[in-house]
Every structure is written in C-alpha cells, then in structure tokens.
C-alpha cells in the first residue's frame, strides 16, 4: 500500500491568504523532501528535512521529529506564482538505500 | 553548477516503436534514479544506480524496459515496443549515496499513440 498520504489533493486560495499541506506516513521515515511541479513538468525541490523545521521566504516546512510520521508545508501570503502541484516524498528506514516514496500530489491554484 | 539534464524533452511514438531517454546527473553524484510519472500521479521509481551498479530494478518492466549506466555517469533508459500505457513523463534524478535529497531533471514527456 501507499506509504505517503497527502492531503488535501486540491486546494484553491486567493492571493494573500495562508494555507497548509500535510503528508502522513504509514511508517517511520528518516527524511522528507517537498517539491513543486510547474506546468512544464519540472520538479523543483523546496525543502529537504531530516528533522525539525525549515523556512524559505513565505514557505515553511516541518517534520515531526518525535514519531517521524508526518510533515507539513505552510504557505503564507499566497501569490499567483505559488500555483502548481506540490509533492512530498519520504525516505523510509535503513535497507532502502535512498529510495523516496512520493505522495499523489496536491494541486494548488492561487487566484487574484 | 549545472543541474540534471535530460533529453529529449518530448517524444511521440506509435505503439510498437522503441525510444531511448538520456540523463546526465549533477557532477559528482554517484546515485542516479529513473522515475515514471503518469499524468496526475506522483513519480514512481523504476530503477536506481550507485555508480554503474543497479541497486534496485524491481519496478522496471523488464520485458520491455532497460536501463544502463556503463561508466557511472550518464544513463540511458530504453523502452522496446512501447505501449499506450507507457505514456508518462520520465524523470531522472541524482544524489549522493546515502543522502536522500534528490535533484531532478526537467523530464521527458512521452506520448504513445
């Protein structure tokens, strides 16, 4: 079964609003990586976390350091250019090399 | 520093034709991954290499797909006798071995008619 469950699958925001995406993992994960995929199909890495939180401009991501079973991506003051599909991908424990399991994505649409 | 490069960017085939995709990873990255991403789905790992060795190809349809990385740098993914179900974007990524952070190329969008 799927190891990475993303929610919501789609989201519509107005410019200037805040929101959050979440990924739940069915097993303990070592690390998580968040991506945005643009309309041309390019996967842009936003964050890589082995624990704790990271922030970059209006984006902030957290990885549950205790249970290692979920991660969040917060978007503050959403802008039109934030539109795209967001994926989280997680690395399971030892024995898998560096394999990432991807969620099914969250399609974000930001409108004026 | 150059990122991961892939070619071609697009390919359109008839069923039964063959196609090859090429990937050049980030310089110094010893681990290379090939993913298949069907429309409106997340990427799914097909195969990955450490240097020239295949580490895991359990998800690669071995009857029609093959992947090589002969010198541990560039890699080629080939589909023999493509089927309509192979329509997808094929993504290449690279990383340092043992570090899960991966960097992706722009992908090749394949359409099989």
Image: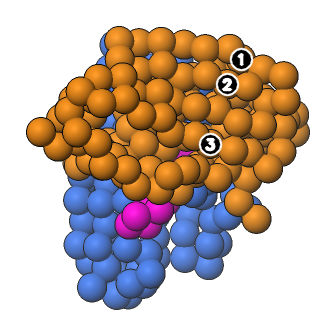
Chain colours: A orange, B blue
B78 is higher (above) or lower (below) than B2: below
Say if labels 2 and 3 share a chain: yes
At x 84%, y 22%, the residue is A66
Q: Give coordinates of residue B54: x percent, y percent.
A: 70, 47
Mark before the other along the chain sequence, 3 or 1: 3
Residue B36: in magenta span: yes
- Quarter of the figure with the N terminus of chain B: top left
> Residue A23: which disc?
3
> In the rendered image, which quarter is residue B25 located in?
top left
Q: In this view, does A109 lie above or below B11?
A: above
State the residue position of label 2.
A63
Q: In which quarter of the image is the C terminus of chain B?
A: bottom left
Residue B49 seen from this side: no
Tell which subunit mark 3 falls on.
A
Q: Which residue is drawn at 17% across and 43% down?
A: A111
Q: Name the residue under label 1.
A: A51
Which residue range is magenta in the image? B33-41
* Residue A17 visible in rendering: yes
Lateral position of residue B1 relative to residue A80, left or right? right
Chain to which the residue tagged by mark 1 belongs: A
């Amino acid at each position: 079964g799927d190891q990475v469950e993303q929610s919501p699958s789609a989201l519509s925001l107005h410019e200037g609003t805040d929101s959050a995406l979440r990924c739940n993992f069915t097993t303990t994960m070592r690390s998580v990586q968040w991506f945005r995929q643009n309309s041309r199909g390019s996967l842009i890495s936003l964050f890589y976390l082995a624990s704790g939180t990271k922030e970059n401009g209006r984006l902030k991501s957290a990885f549950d350091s205790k249970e290692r079973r979920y991660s969040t991506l917060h978007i503050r003051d959403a802008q039109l250019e934030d539109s795209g599909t967001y994926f989280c991908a997680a690395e399971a424990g030892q024995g898998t090399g560096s394999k990432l399991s991807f969620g099914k994505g969250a399609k974000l649409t930001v409108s004026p | 520093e150059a990122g991961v490069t892939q070619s071609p960017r697009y390919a359109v085939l008839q069923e039964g034709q063959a196609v090859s995709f090429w990937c050049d990873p980030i310089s110094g990255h010893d681990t290379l991954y090939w993913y298949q991403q069907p429309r409106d789905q997340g990427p799914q790992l097909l195969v990955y290499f450490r240097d020239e060795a295949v580490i895991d190809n359990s998800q690669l349809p071995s009857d029609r797909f093959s992947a090589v990385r002969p010198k541990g740098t560039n890699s080629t993914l080939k589909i023999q006798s493509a089927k309509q179900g192979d329509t997808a974007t094929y993504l290449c990524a690279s990383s340092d071995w043992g570090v899960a952070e991966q960097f992706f190329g722009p992908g090749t969008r394949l359409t099989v008619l």
